Image: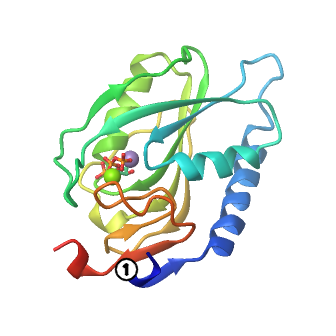
Amino acid sequence: MDDHMERILWTEDEISKRVSELASQISADFASLSPSSPPPVFVGVATGAFLFLSDLVRCIKFPISVDLIRVESYGSGTQSSGAPSISSNLKIDVNGKHVVVVEDIVDTGHTLSCLLEHLKSKGASSVSVCTFLDKRARRKVEFDLVGEGKFYRGFECPDAFVVGYGMDFAELYRNLPYVGVLKPELYN
Ligand code: PRP
Ligand code: MN
Ligand code: MG
């Protein structure tokens, strides 16, 4: 698959270093939580966030719960439909709990905005977002974090079609350990 890449944006080593920095930042921010409050719930957004979620939570050294949610918007193409829907729901009741949404990438913001509304309606006492990549240049909708929730980003992403480290094109390339830009002839 390496020969399908136009260029590599972040190597496996760079990713792993940044992920542990994010985990330290989150741990420091949650350190002041009262020991009697329920453990925060880390909610990974399937499918894209699966590698980032597993790497991130392995670096967290205090008790947390982990769950998955599925929000679909892209189908198999490269353009967001703009109308995401929740297709697989949480197992954990997040009412009264602090939630950290774990995403691989925030692009237009539609997926995140849908999720934040959903988690707010489920009674989460705060919702933070930890996204591996933030493609800010393409944001179409702004979103409101819930309560005292914070926004964590691994890297700001250039406006290119990136794959790897969980991110796909037509369900391929998710298993690459690095993030690269796909050669345009492969998706045009
Ligand atoms: C991708 C990505 C984010 C979302 C971001 O997921 O993993 O979840 O799009 O796009 P947005 O900010 O424009 O909404 P996708 O819908 O492709 O599903 P996947 O995670 O299964 O690949
Ligand atoms: Mn996704
Ligand atoms: Mg996708």
Rendered view: 105 above or below 10:
above
Q: Nearer the viewer, residue 3 or 49?
A: 3
The answer, for residue 118, to whether it is visible in the render is: yes
What's the residue at 53%, 46% (across, down)?
A: 50
* Crowd rating for badge 1 (residues with CA inside 10 Å; few <14, some 14–19, many 20+): some
On the image, the x and y values in percent for residue 65 come to 67, 27
Is 188 situated left or right of 96 in this image?
A: left
Residue under the image location 50 percent in, 48 percent down: 49
Q: Residue at x 48, y 81 (%)?
A: 8
Q: Is residue 172 above or below residue 119?
A: below
Name the image quarter holding the C terminus.
bottom left
Q: From the viewer's perspective, is 89 left or right of 65?
A: left
User: Residue shown at 32%/42% (left/top)?
Assistant: 111
Residue 5 visible, this angle: no
Mark 1 CB within 8 Å of ligand 3: no
Return the residue at label 1.
4
- SS label for mark 1: helix
Q: Is residue 7 above or below residue 112?
A: below
The picture quadrant where one finds residue 13 is bottom right
Q: Is residue 81 left or right of residue 174?
A: left
Q: Is residue 120 left or right of residue 93?
A: left
**Quarter of the rendering occupied by the N terminus:** bottom left
